[in-house]
Amino acid sequence: MKKIVDVAAGVITRADGSFLLGQRAPGTFYPGYWEFPGGKVEPGETPAAALVRELDEELGIRAHTLYPWLMREHHYEHAHVRLHFFEVAAWSGEVNDHVHSALAWQCADALAVGPMLPANGPILKALCLPRRMGITHAGEIGVEAQLAALDAALAAGLRLVQVREPVLSAPARESFAAAVVRRAHAAGALVVVNGDVALAQCCGADGVHLPAHQLTALTQRPALPWVGASCHGRDELLRAAELGLDYALLGAVRPTPTHPGRSGLGWEGFARLAAALPMPVLALGGLGDADMAAARAAGAHGIAGIRGMWQLSASAPCRTPSCADGA
């Protein structure tokens, strides 16, 4: 049995949304392949401390803020590697490479270098997942009001929408989902439909979002580009990971009107449940845009909301920057 080697890797980003990749040098395993900067965790080090040290040694930069993000395992010919990915949200210094053949600032949706190191490749799709998800409730506030709120949020930069309408009739839900998809796709946003693969396919949505009871009953991942699930505990999160889902929602962080009388996880509870998973986890439950920093510090990819995401306006942009914005 191969020994597990712990490695810390950093997703170093710039304001335009691009991230730094390094090309492995000759004389190393997988020479010429591209990877996220980082290195081996030494005995007595935490993965976070190892990454701070490695970024200083490899690139000459000082990491000030690290957000725990994903943990992925990969079996190479020479080792079983456990990669701890962090998002490097704040750093200082000039990037000067000391170990790679080349460096490149790249975007996940327009990668111009390759091949990627096998263990690093799946990270690219996770980086394409927007940081904020708006969950519809047209059955509560009315279809026209929800579509107006959607238009305003898309204009403010919302790029991920979940259609969740348990009280609308089937024809009304189908018509509403189609209207959401048209508006969202025109703005470059993704749409997932709650609990209904057939409706997602029929209306041209990008994927499906599974309630917890559907997740636990699944034997294989639905054949859609984006598949996520609602989770309330570690067992459900591990099941989502086992099925190869693209993301999970975890909550509720705070008590919400949707689940009256249920106490929230709090950020400490969220961090404990969401730690060391291979897919992004968004925090859910009584959250708004002001909670983003706390969410990411707890290991969340971002936040989701039924109400808070529809209070966005053009004066409070919410989207994740992309390379298409310039740089």
Image (cartoon, rainbow, N blue to C red):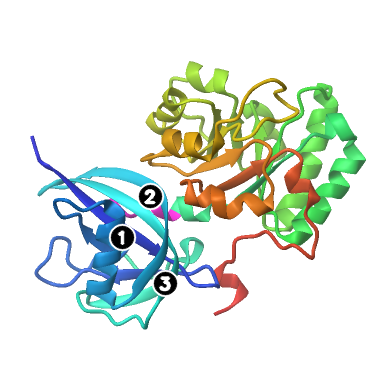
Is disc 1 in contact with disc 2, using a CB cutoff of under 8 Å?
no
Query: Hey, what amino acid is under mark 1?
Result: Met
Quarter of the image with the C terminus is bottom right
Could you say where residue 86 lies in the image, as x and y percent from the top left? 38, 55
Question: How many numbered circles are shown?
Answer: 3
Sequence-wise, the earlier of marks 3 and 2 is: 3
Q: What stretch of residues is rendered in magenta?
A: 116-124
Q: Secondary structure at mark 1?
A: loop
Which residue sits at x=40%, y=67%? 64
Q: How dense is the environment of label 2, judged by Cα within 10 Å: few (below 14), some, or many (20 and up)?
A: some
Q: Classify 10 Å Cα crowding around label 3: few (below 14), some (14-19), many (20 and above).
A: some
Q: Which numbered marker is on residue 122?
A: 2
Q: Nearer the viewer, residue 173 or 282?
A: 282
* Horizontal arrangement in the rendering, residue 51 relative to residue 89 (left or right): left
Q: Is residue 297 left or right of residue 200?
A: left
Which of marks 3 and 1 precedes in the sequence?
A: 3
